[in-house]
Image (cartoon, coloured by chain):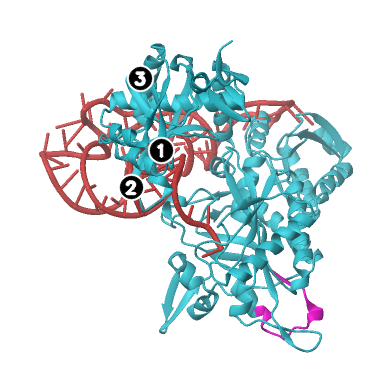
Chain colours: A cyan, B red
Amino acid sequence: MNEIAIKKDGEIIDTQTAKELGFEGEQIHLDNSADALEVLRHSTAHLMAQAIKSLYPDAEFYVGPVVKEGFYYDFKTSTEIGAGDLKKIEKQMLSFAKKKYKIEKYEITMDEAKEKFKNDHLKLEVMKRIPSDMVSIYKQGEFEDLCRGPHLPNIGLIRYFKLTKIAGAYLGGDSKNEMLTRIYGIAFADKESLKAHMEQLAEAEKRDHRKLGNEMKLFTFREEVGAGFPIWLPAGGRLRARLESLLFKAHRKRGYEPVRGPEMLRSDLWKTSGHYQNYGENMYFTHIDELEFGVKPMNCVGHIKVYEDELHSYRDLPIKYFEYGVVHRHEASGALHGLFRVREFTQDDAHIFCRADQIEEQIIEVVDFVDKIMSTFEFDYKMMISTKPEKAVGSDEVWEVSTQALKNAMDQNELAYEIDEGGGAFYGPKIDIKITDAIGREWQCGTIQLDFNLPERFKLEYNGEDNDKIQPVMIHRAILGSFERFIGILTEHYAGEFPMFIAPTQVAIVPVAETHKEYAKVLSDKLIDINADSEIYGKNDSLNKRIRTAEKTRVPMIVVIGDEEIANKTVAIRDRRTREQYNLSEEEFLKLIQTKINEVNF
RNA sequence: GCCGACAUAGCUCAGUUGGCUAGAGCAGCUGAUUUGUAAUCAGCAGGCCCGGGGUUCAAAUCCUCGUGUCGGCACCA
């Protein structure tokens, strides 16, 4: 078996380095283990660079790391490279691989390296970021690259790979820098795994919410309406309404009061809140009668005005206001992505005004709320605590206290979380809830933000025990995040096969012949009485055709009614999931639907 | 916003190196048929070829500026 590297003290060391240093350790073979793939993909990135260099001799190279979904290499050429060129590069890679060049390693000083790569301004850029005096060079055939490794012993081991996409990327990940070309690729130890991976990607594409949203008539976008402004179609409207009403109940149960703020507020308020200064470039403004108004990008100011409407006692806290708040944010054009990233969306937003000693219990209550909903939909999610960002308001001290409060709440309840340094809102730290989409990208949905700043800026207060004026703490929170993104994720999660309690249509009724339509209508009305939507497939098509059409809408249940059913007062059910058919009396059927619709309570 | 690609009927897509009246399937409409669990048959209608400008005897096709979409990057209070 081929040994491609060894593992020593948890570190992967390639055979070149091991030989040089006389190391021994656990052998890594060329298979699909995480360690082996790390080495394989890294070397594949180098092979790609070698191919690019031979096809485009003036190419300069930045970095080519292994990432979650394969590898990439950033580079620059004077010729334009497009998606059509990937095949050509792949071919060149294969022909190099066939030559089975050894991958050799040697070390030189930083100064020697700078001399060696003096014509490659990108490599020089890389070297600026390396603190050590010595660097290693990997050489395969004519091609040499500055690299830390580890690498395969021979490029002939690279056989099963694919270049997947080409894109632009800023040098060093900074938009102030020049833009390089980035090619992504993937590699595996064997042919089957590569094939399986490509098939999995194709499978995931089928559940893309943009595709399903179009097919299932959930929502649409139109050029003439404007980018990022979704249009909800009837089916999507029904789905969304079900989600809204379930969630409304869940909020009421937890003591939230529904309120509503205006869509736009005078700019002075956004100046007080800090949004004007920190976020103004992404807000929509309008001028009327010499006054400037800002269309709300958030609902907190409105809720603050609700709080200010009366005096509050410490006994009243916590006070919880919620609103399905429509917000507008001018997102960068390139950021727009189906329902996941839009310019107008509706948040399931709430603000909790509480005392400092109530922070922890309130945070935990919200985390429980989140978990209740996520587990109902069987979502895997993770939580992230985001700390003070560069653009921020408030003193370091307040930030420290509030960040610690979030951590304490999580720690004391033994909840797992990761830290996102500098990822907080400008007014406070937050806990983000992230869900993974069909192709593995993570999207932030819910968020819990602790805020000492806005209460200060708006001089909020309540009367304490000694009748003194005390400033409350604000917790901003959203569970779904936005209906848009959440429904997008739900669509992919279920591949369009929504469970009964949320499906746009609960039942498809297929009458066998013209004479059965009347009963279909009676049944449909009875379904409305139990809050179930149905659709009658009574068109002048064959029965088979109508069943096929109904199936394709991904409706959870199809019932067929004909002479027999009418005579016996039964329905013939065809279940989407099991593809089984069975009969139920009308009474049992209605009861079943009712149970299925009501089985979920957040 | 940046790099690259793309935009043809409601939807999914054809449309050669610029050249006759821009095609197909599905969906829609009209008939015939009245069906027992995944496509009955026939006919009809449907297009500012994304929008402005330009090149050319001639533009869906070439150039240019917009708009929108896609893949990334950057951004995401």
The quarter holding residue A257 reads bottom right
Give the residue number, with chain letter if any, for mark 2.
A178
How many residues crowd mark 2 within 10 Å: few (<14), some (14–19), many (20+)?
Answer: few
Point out residue A529 in the picture as x, y percentages from the top left corner. 80, 55
Distance from label 3 to label 1 (Cα)?
34 Å
Task: For mark 3, give the secondary structure.
Answer: helix
Task: For mark 2, give the secondary structure.
Answer: loop
Residue type (three-letter) at the residue carrying disc 1: Asp
Please identify the quadrant where the C terminus of chain A is shown.
bottom right
Image: A411 above or below A2:
below
Say yes or no: labels 1 and 2 on the same chain: yes
A550 displayed left or right of A372 = left
Label 1 marks a residue whose chain is A
Q: Tell which of A466 and B42 is nearer to you.
A: A466
Q: Are marks 3 and 1 in contact (CB under 8 Å)?
A: no
Label 3 marks a residue whose chain is A
Whether A326 is among the magenta residues is no
Whether A323 is among the magenta residues is yes
The reply to whether residue A432 is in sight is yes
Q: Tell which of A303 and A428 is nearer to you.
A: A428
A541 displayed left or right of A593 = left
Task: For mark 1, give the secondary structure.
Answer: loop
